[in-house]
Structure formats: C-alpha cells, structure tokens
Amino acid sequence: MIYNTYKKEVQSLLSFKSVSTDLVFKPEIEKTVNWLQQYFTDNKFTAKRIDGYGNPVVVARYIKDPNLETYFIYGHYDVQPASQDDGWDSDPFTLTEKEGRLYARGVVDNKGQFMIHLVSIIELIKSNELNKNIIFVVEGDEETGGDGISRLFNEQPELFKADHYIISDGEMPYQPVITASFRGTTNLTVKLTTANNNLHSGLYGGAIPGATIEAAKLIANMYDDNNKITIPNFYRDNIDPSNQEKQQCLEMDKIKQDTLKQTGVKKWFTEKTGSICGAIAFETMIMPSSLLGGYTGSGYSNIVPSSASIKFNFRIAANQSVDKMIELFKEYIKNVIPSYVTAQIIEIQSKNDPIKIDITSPIHKKAIEMLKNVYGKEVLIDYCGATLPIVVDIKKVFGADPVLISLANDDCNMHGVNENYNINLIKKGLEFSTKFFSEK
C-alpha cells in the first residue's frame, strides 16, 4: 500500500533536525541533503546538490521521454525550530501516530507535502505508469526568507525550465484548495531617540520626552478605529476584489468557521471587503510586531528611556509595489515625528512582491477537475494573505503561473507545537498525485 511506503520514507526524512534558522543545526542540514540525494538516486533520478546559494539546493531529474511535458515540483527541507520543552506531546523529530494523525516537525511544512508527490512518482516509475518528465527542486532556506533560490533561478535558469510548475506548501479546510494570489511582504525597523542616554525619572521625568511614549504614539496614530492605516495614499493602488472574488472569500469564511473560532479572536475587521478571508487577502497591512525600549529585566528601573525600536511587518496586496509602500512609510515617519525625536529606519529585510495567479489556464483547470473527483468536493479558491517568494520568482524568471495545490489540514499547527498531518488527507493526497502524474 502506497501509504505505508510513504510513512516509512517520510519518517526517515523527518528525523533530521534541519532547522535553517540556527547554524548549530548545520550538520543536520548536511544529513538531510545527503539523504535526499541518496533517495533520489536509489529511485532512478539523477540528483545533485548545488552550493553557493545559502543551504544546499537538491535538484533531481527523471526524464522518461524528451517528447513528454516536464513538470517542476518544489519543496523545502528546512523546518522551524522545535523542542519537546516547548510543549510537544512527543519528540518533534520522531514521527508519532495518534488518533488518525502523524505528528512531527516538518510533517506538513514542508517535508510531508513534497514527499506526497515524490513517493507517488517513484511508485509510478516502478510500475511504468509515469507520463511526465520530472524535475524536483528542494531547497533549505525557505524558513529564513533567504534569496538563494531566487539568485539560482536568475543565474542558472536553464536548469529549471519546465512546462508546468507544481507547489504543495499550504493548508486546506478539509476541502481541496487552489491558491490564486499571495500578498507581498517586507520587514523594517524604526529606531526613535529622544536623549543621549536613559535619564533618572526622579530628576527629569515629566519635563522630557520618553522614547517609549513617542513610539507608542507613533503606532497608535497610524491606525483609525476600524484598524485601517492612516498614512496618506496608502491604499491608492489597492484594487478592490471582484464580486466573484468576494463571494469566494465568503465561502472560505464559512468553511473555515471552526478554525477561525479556535484563534480566540473577539473582533474581526471586515468593513472593506465584507469577509475575514477578503480582508486578509486583498488589503495591505502594517503590523508592529515588536516594541522594544527602556528597561526589560526583572523588577523596575526608574528611568526615562532615551531610545525605542519598533519592528514593522508589511503585507502588500496585489497591484501595489513593495518599494512604493516603503517610500510612503518613510515619508509618513518624516512628517509625523516631532522635531525633538530622531527617527531612523535601520533595517529593511525580505522584500517580496505580491502576485496573482491565472487559475484559468489548462493545467489549472485539469488540476481543479481532478481534485474535485478525488476529494468529492468543490475546489475552493484561496486568496492567500501570506507569502511564498518562489511563486514570484517562477513568474518573473519563467513567465509561468505555478499550480498551487494545498494538501494539508488547516488545523495542522504549522510552525507550532504538535505539528500534525491528518492521515485521511495524506491518503487523498497520494491518490490525487498518483492520478495527476499518470494521466496522459
């Protein structure tokens, strides 16, 4: 049974602590890359590692017939940190089965999902039923937002040219999903300074500005009562969703009701689009993800803080430019910061453009029809508020609209404690992948 094969192989891959955010795990990265290379070559692929672009990228090919179409399949082997001390019920790097789910770090994001396609394709090779040429590209820096894969595509595009590009790195609410858009993203830090040093609050407090107060005022004034950003022209190029897109977002809200309730959120801001999913997908957002200033140790320090730093995360809606949004933000800071406060933008990181996917292409229609047949349910169209940079890279370099097929349960705790994959969805994923890559 293909599921048993899948479980055995994914168990081996999940045992490696391939955490990309900490150099301590570099040896585990190497073990992962070696395992992948060996697994590919043991199963009739030609495989190589490419160094010099962050963590090694594994590229594997199986060319059955040069006259057949070539399918590029993406995955990433790096994972988020995890420890049983975080609250996991079991060792996060030992695959555990419980109550119809497999638990481990990376079982969904993303080892477990790209292995759905890999195991299915290997079984088709063995039975001589594969009707595609295959290129697998598995990178190790997705979780860090590294630009290695982007540089590799731009510098060596001939290695990755294909007829179709397939990515499974998302979630679904127990109903099949095709992703149609991603927001762009960037992060930056603003540092505010009000004095040369922290000053005694008994001697100076009340007569001088505090950096933490100025930081709080900056954040508070950036939003109105409906949580909308007050920066002039901020929404100027933000295109409203079409009636069809609004309806699809409302449908997604209904399907995801239980998941949304589990967040514990008591207020949703949906005035503009009329739906939670619409607000997440079609609106540009700035979120202050941290405010650091003054004394943060135990007890209290009687000071007037002289500096404070705010980290901002931007999510940029389709049709808006990341660079333009940064310039609007800089202009806003310059205009609203009082003359007695020095403001510096000290870091800008991870600039990724938003993207919309043409889901009306023949390959998308084929995937949607097959998903509907396998899962026995209508396919939902997801306008995602998150970011997957490789989608933009594929569109820019190869001019292709990737087919974005989510295969995992949306209550999987991706990035969290007890990350898990519903076994019924694993089996459905294997069934879909087998049919998709064997179809003539």
Image (spheres, rainbow, N blue to C red):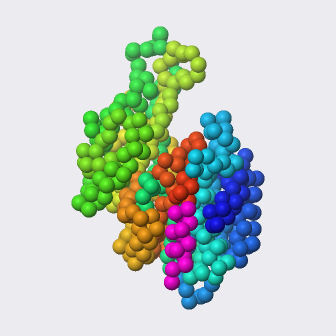
* Residue 192 against residue 104 in the figure, above or below: above
All told, the count of numbered labels is 0
The quarter of the picture where the N terminus appears is bottom right
Work out whether residue 274 or residue 332 is closer to the camera in this orientation and state it: 274
Residue at 41 percent across and 67 percent down: it is 372
Q: Residue 301: where, in percent of width, then height? A: 54, 16
Image quarter of residue 110? bottom right
Q: Residue 337: where, in percent of width, then height? A: 36, 35
Of all residues shown, which one is farthest toward the bottom? 67
Reply yes or no: does residue 165 show up in magenta.
Answer: no
Work out whether residue 168 or residue 262 is closer to the camera in this orientation and state it: 262
Image quarter of residue 336? top left
Left or right: 73, with 126 as reference point: left
Q: Residue 240: where, in percent of width, then height? A: 26, 56
Image quarter of residue 134? bottom right
Left or right: 110, with 32 as reference point: left
Does residue 382 show up? yes
Residue at 35 percent across and 34 percent down: it is 266
Dominant SS of magenta comes to helix
What's drawn in magenta, residue-wise?
A: 427-440
Left or right: 289, with 420 as reference point: left
Reply yes or no: does residue 431 show up in magenta.
Answer: yes
Q: Residue 285: where, in percent of width, then height? A: 37, 47
Residue at 45 percent across and 14 percent down: it is 204
* Residue 302 against residue 231 in the figure, above or below: above
Work out whether residue 216 or residue 23 is closer to the camera in this orientation and state it: 23
Does residue 325 show up? no
Residue at 52 percent across and 58 percent down: it is 425
